[in-house]
Amino acid sequence: MNPAELLNYGNKHLGEKKLNDAKILLEHCLKLKPSKFYFSKKNIKTCEKNSYQKLLNKRKKGLPTAYITEETEFMGLKFFVNKNVLIPRQETEILVEAVLNLLTAYHLPLTTILDIGTGCGNIAISLAKYIPDAKIVATDISKEALHVAKKNAKLNGVLDEITFFQSDIFESLTTYHLPLTTYDIIISNPPYIKSSEIKKLQKEIQHEPKIALDGGKDGLNFYKKIVPMSRKLLKKNGFLMFEIGYHHSKKIRKMLEADKFRNIKIINDYSRQERVIYGQNNN
Ligand SMILES: C[S@@+](CC[C@H](N)C(=O)[O-])C[C@H]1O[C@@H](n2cnc3c(N)ncnc32)[C@H](O)[C@@H]1O
């Protein structure tokens, strides 16, 4: 059996909807680029077929591919992931791109950034990578997530650009002496799924940390806490930027307006769902 035949076997095993997963798992198993599958004359050993079979079985049981390979991509960068962190979603790139666009649009030296709920560090690390002079503080309540985030910052060569900090939202930021006390941008992709909806989501999502998903009864717990406090931590004209669930924009816009944020903008994702909201601090 050669790699192309083994891939064919994997495709049949996982079914049509997971063709890409079969490919990623084979790449991981053989340490061979997918472009080489079709031309390789390599003879698959029994142990290689067995270990591929084990990966396919895990995937079939619903474990996300990224948790199996312990790797994913975000903003063109590689990230280590495990069960302690949410797997970065492609839609979250829209939030990072919004920051990069703001920098260009406002011609401002926006360089101090606070990322709340950093998870594997994907937002903070991408910003550190693409904004050379950025000084970033990244927080999470989960020690395990912060461990993963630091590992990723090292992997991507930006460990010195980011201060990682364990905090329940803002709690520790005010208690401890941090290198930064006010920010040009506060950014967050907080947990925003309604508690009652989590169990109804697909089985892959059930493997992700509940703490990364659960936004409380209406999904808005984190926005309610972050919006009012941000006014005090943002510099004048600084931006508060969120990823949001598709049915949340009206309520979050009202929260921002109530706290006198102006220039509020909403950005849609690739499926035309409202995905990002941001506003500018008036203080
Ligand atoms: C939706 S995930 C986002 C992860 C990552 N930033 C991303 O965009 O993929 C939310 C993150 O918030 C963290 N979190 C949950 N409750 C928190 C709290 N009270 N304070 C700070 N972070 C919290 C979770 O551990 C998780 O890493």
Image (cartoon, rainbow, N blue to C red):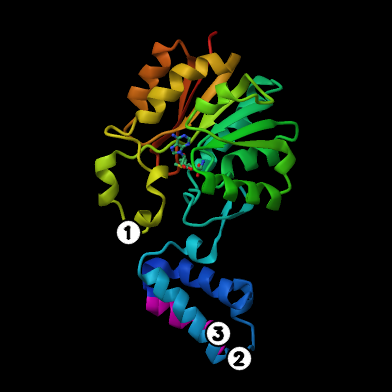
Density class for disc 2 (Cα within 10 Å; few <14, some 14-19, many ≥20) is: few
In the image, residue 120 lies in the stretch drawn in magenta: no
Q: Could you say whether the residue bearing mark 3 is in a helix, strand or loop? A: helix
Upstream in sequence: badge 2 or badge 1: 2
Q: Which quadrant of the view contains residue 195?
A: top left
Upstream in sequence: badge 3 or badge 1: 3
Seen at 55% across and 47% down, the residue is 120
* Residue 221 position (above or below residue 174): below
Residue that mark 2 sits on:
43
Horizontal side of 57 relative to 163 (left or right) equals: left
Q: Which mark is residue 163?
A: none
Density class for disc 1 (Cα within 10 Å; few <14, some 14-19, many ≥20) is: few
Which quarter of the rendered picture does the C terminus lie within? top right
Q: Which mark is residue 203?
A: 1
Seen at 54% across and 88% down, the residue is 47
Task: Specify the amino acid type for callout 1.
Answer: Lys
Can I make out residue 17 in this image? Answer: yes
- Give how far across and how far down residue 212 sits, in percent: 42, 43
Give the magenta range.
1-13
Q: Could you say whether the residue bearing mark 2 is in a helix, strand or loop? A: loop
Task: Specify the amino acid type for callout 3.
Answer: Glu
Q: Could you say whether the residue bearing mark 1 is in a helix, strand or loop? A: loop
Upstream in sequence: badge 3 or badge 2: 2
